Image (tube, rainbow, N blue to C red):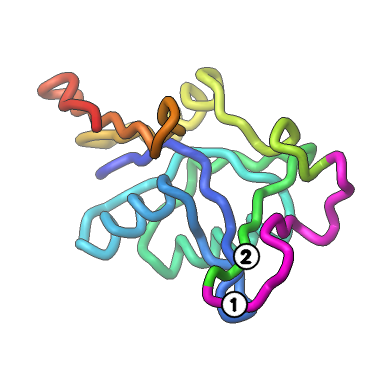
Amino acid sequence: MIIVIGSPIGRLHDDQIVASGTPARAAMAAGAAGSGVQLLGKTGDDATADGLLLDLTRGGVGHVALLRDPARVTPLEPDPAGDDEDPAIVDESASPAQSDAAERPSLDAADVDLGLRYLTDFASWSGCRPGGGRGVSLECRSPRVGRRGRR
C-alpha cells in the first residue's frame, strides 16, 4: 500500500465537489493505476470535505487516516472551465474569518503520527507540500530502501 501525506482541497466541477490539490491528485493517480493507496491529511468537517471524500472513494483512494477538524474550513476552488467570477470561492457556510489561509486545516507532525497509527501495512509514502517559491515539493520514502528522492 502507498500512503500519500498531504491535505486535499475541494474543486467545484460541473456543480459537484471533487478532490483536488497535489496530494489528492497523486493518490487518485496511484489508485487509477491499480495501487492500494491511502491519503493521510486533514480537512474541515464540512460539505466540501464530504464531497471530496466521496470523490476519493470513487477514485479508489482510502481515507481512513484523513482527519476532520470542525474548527477549520476545507478550501474550495472554482471550476477553472466554469464562468465563476469569484476566484476565491470557499464553503458557503464559512464566515469571512474562517476562509483565511490561517484558518484552513493544517497538518502537523502529531497529525501524521496519529494517521500512521491507523495505517500499519505500507510499502512507501510520499509527502506533498508547497515548494519554496515555485510549485510543490514531493518527497518519497520506502521503509526498505530509505529515502528515495525529492522533486
Residue at image mark 2? 78
Q: Residues within 10 Å of mark 1 (few under 14, many from 20)?
A: few
Q: Residues within 10 Å of mark 2 (few under 14, many from 20)?
A: many
- Label 2 amino acid? Pro
Residue at image mark 1? 82
Q: Quadrant of residue 59?
A: bottom left
Image quadrant where one finds the C terminus = top left
The residue segment tinted magenta is: 81-97
Q: Is residue 133 left or right of residue 52?
A: left
Tell me what residue is drawn at x 35 percent, y 32 percent: 137
Vertical placement of 123 versus 79: above or below? above
Helix, strand, or loop for circle 2?
Answer: loop
Image quadrant where one finds the N terminus = top left
Question: What mark, if any, has residue 119 been given in the picture?
Answer: none
Secondary structure mainly formed by the magenta segment: loop
- Label 1 amino acid? Gly
Vertical placement of 127 versus 11: above or below? above
Residue closer to the observer: 135 or 77: 135
Vertical placement of 16 versus 125: above or below? below
Asked whether residue 82 is drawn in magenta, I would say yes
Q: Quadrant of residue 127?
A: top left
**Do the residues under discs 2 and 1 have CB atoms within 8 angstroms?**
yes
Q: Is residue 41 left or right of residue 17?
A: left
Mark 2–mark 1 Cα distance, whole angstroms, equals 8 Å
Residue 110 at x, y percent in the picture: 55, 19
Residue closer to the observer: 73 or 83: 83
Asked whether residue 87 is drawn in magenta, I would say yes
Single out the residue that lies furthest toward the bottom. 14
Tell me what residue is drawn at x 65 percent, y 57 percent: 76
Tell me what residue is drawn at x 61 percent, y 75 percent: 16
Q: Quadrant of residue 80?
A: bottom right
